[in-house]
Image (tube, rainbow, N blue to C red):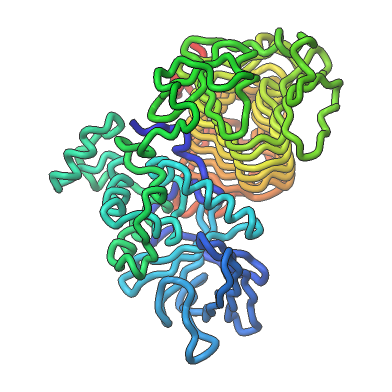
């Protein structure tokens, strides 16, 4: 069975919903010095006075990674593949003269090389990263089940070159199946009807694919038409880390812990949690605060047991449990440990908070009606410092008491790629989210409510995305307060918040599409919407609209 843990992960700039691909894409000119990653080579653009772009690349292996783009003035943001020498060999899919579009839509930026029929055959994503980080992200993507990323990550030919053509066909059709596409081919029909997540629709024309899904379908179809020699595909068992929902990652790789097949033995001497298989993945199931903290290890999946509330405060207050090699007892502000991994009981105004520093690739998931809470009013429920690839799912997170002044629900300082999915963040403290100097933050199908100072506070956040989230019963100051931060909202609802508080206080334009905003016009605040690509938002003067039905996340 497919897991949802990484469903919306690995997105970088790529995970936001869209409308129709061809008609709504924004375009812009490539700028000098911009960097684009195609899965194996990091290209840097050098723009000449006449608009021609020279792309020079570096990769893991030496090679002549150079190609040229000539400006096509028939459409803004359109180029064509050209050559700076008669015998130039293109290092990308495509032939001289083929169209290249620079797409900028809903917070994502990428180059799409198109075949003469218009289908995408090669992608290069705009990135702020260096080669080392790009390679690390690509490697991490390769280790995930294919089903978890095909609808949320813009694929590239390097990634697809590791997958046999038969599976390419299944991948391409699974994107449609995730939306309930009704299949005519009997093998596809039989395959997807066996999946618990598949719910066919009556009319395929009602299905709207996002820009990632449309591009991935075109790219996969293009790869299917190429020989394995051209694709660079070499059959190797280890090249197939994932697949469709029914085959997951293939053989269970417990390695030295093969004796844990019963799913009930401790995974680690430092943890009293138990190893379980959940939605096709291996987790440590925890029921206590001590098990939870001891299970925080890079690369580990943590499952908070069903109907369990983990109150972190008694453990945080017990000095005898701390000052081990990774668990530290610290005074207020005493969490500066450079790059070392550590878990802190950190002093705040009226108690202590859990701060997790320099960890990466951790999943924290609730099994059902699962909660993580703290008692101090001025503490973050969870606080992350310089962490990477942290995925929080299906949890209710908050405080046992209400308060003001300091301490939100989730704090993020530094790091990148923090994802919150299907969670309920509820108030006390100040803000549901406080993000500082971080990038690639995303939140899906979640609530932020009953916060005493506002919904979120952001400083220097590069690319934060919110999809199908509800923000309600928040009050006091500017509700969404951001400095030098890039935000995208899609399908979100803002209602029943304090009508006397400004809703937005952002100093940069942001993207908003298909959202419902119930807030007095005079208190909407600083709204500088980017182009909405035809997607409409609903604005209403009445913050207490009676038509809103809660999404059913979190406490009743």
Residue 335: percent from the left, percent from the top? 81, 29
Residue drawn at 55 percent across, 35 percent down = 443
Residue 385: percent from the left, percent from the top? 72, 34
Residue drawn at 54 percent across, 79 percent down = 68
* 339 with respect to 370 (left or right): right
Observer able to see residue 350: yes
Residue 412: percent from the left, percent from the top? 69, 34
Residue drawn at 51 percent across, 62 percent down = 38
Decide which of 265, 134 is in the foreground and name it. Answer: 265
In this rendering, is residue 479 above or below 264? below
Question: If the image is split into quadrants, where does the N terminus sit?
Answer: top left
Residue 238: percent from the left, percent from the top? 41, 48
In this rendering, is residue 225 above or below 387? below
* 308 with respect to 414 (left or right): left
Observer able to see residue 476: no
In this rendering, is residue 33 above or below 381? below
Residue drawn at 73 percent across, 45 percent down = 460
Q: How many marks?
A: 0
In this rendering, is residue 289 above or below 516? above
């Amino acid at each position: 069975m497919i897991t949802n843990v990484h469903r919306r992960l690995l997105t970088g700039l790529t995970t936001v919903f869209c409308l129709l691909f061809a008609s709504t894409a924004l375009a812009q000119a490539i700028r000098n010095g911009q960097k684009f990653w195609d899965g194996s080579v990091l290209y840097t653009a050098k723009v000449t006075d006449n608009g021609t772009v020279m792309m020079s690349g570096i990769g893991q292996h030496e090679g002549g990674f150079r190609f040229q783009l000539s400006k096509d003035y028939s459409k803004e943001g359109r180029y064509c593949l050209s050559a700076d020498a008669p015998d130039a060999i293109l290092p990308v899919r495509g032939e001289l003269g083929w169209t290249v579009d620079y797409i900028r839509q809903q917070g994502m930026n990428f180059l799409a090389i198109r075949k003469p029929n218009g289908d995408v055959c090669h992608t290069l994503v705009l990135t702020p990263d260096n080669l080392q980080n790009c390679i690390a992200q690509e490697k991490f993507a390769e280790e995930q089940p294919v089903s978890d990323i095909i609808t949320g990550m813009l694929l590239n030919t390097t990634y697809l070159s590791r997958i046999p053509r038969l599976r390419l066909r299944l991948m391409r059709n699974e994107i449609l199946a995730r939306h309930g596409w009704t299949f005519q081919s009997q093998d596809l029909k039989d395959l997807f009807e066996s999946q618990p997540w598949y719910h066919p629709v009556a009319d395929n024309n009602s299905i709207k694919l996002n820009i990632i899904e449309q591009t991935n379908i075109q790219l996969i179809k293009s790869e299917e038409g190429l020989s394995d020699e051209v694709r660079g595909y070499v059959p190797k068992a280890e090249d197939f880390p994932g697949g469709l929902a029914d085959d997951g990652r293939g053989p269970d790789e417990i390695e030295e812990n093969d004796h844990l097949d019963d799913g009930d033995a401790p995974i680690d001497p430092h943890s009293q949690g138990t190893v379980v298989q959940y939605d096709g993945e291996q987790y440590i199931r925890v029921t206590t605060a001590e098990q939870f903290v001891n299970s925080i290890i890079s690369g580990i999946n943590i499952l908070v047991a069903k109907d369990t509330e983990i109150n972190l405060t008694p453990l945080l207050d017990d000095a005898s449990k701390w000052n081990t090699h990774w668990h530290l007892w610290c005074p207020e502000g005493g969490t500066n440990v450079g790059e070392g991994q550590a878990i802190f009981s950190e002093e705040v105004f009226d108690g202590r908070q859990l701060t997790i520093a320099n960890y990466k690739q951790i999943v924290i998931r609730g099994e059902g009606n699962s909660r993580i809470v703290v008692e101090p009013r001025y503490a973050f429920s969870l606080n992350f410092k310089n962490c990477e690839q942290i995925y929080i799912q299906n949890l209710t997170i908050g405080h046992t008491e209400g308060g003001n002044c300091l301490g939100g629900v989730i704090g993020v300082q530094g790091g990148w790629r923090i994802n919150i999915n299907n969670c309920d963040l509820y108030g006390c403290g100040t803000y549901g989210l406080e993000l500082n100097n971080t990038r690639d933050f995303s939140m899906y199908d979640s609530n932020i409510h009953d916060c005493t100072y506002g919904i979120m506070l952001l400083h220097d956040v590069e690319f934060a995305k919110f999809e199908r989230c509800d923000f309600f019963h928040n009050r006091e100051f500017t509700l969404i307060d951001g400095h030098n931060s890039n935000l995208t909202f899609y399908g979100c609802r803002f209602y029943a918040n304090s009508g006397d508080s400004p809703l937005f206080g952002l100093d940069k334009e942001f993207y908003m599409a298909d959202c419902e905003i119930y807030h007095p016009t005079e208190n909407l605040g600083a709204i500088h919407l980017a182009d909405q690509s035809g997607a409409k938002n609903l604005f209403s003067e009445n913050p207490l609209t009676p038509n809103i039905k809660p999404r059913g996340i979190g406490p009743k």
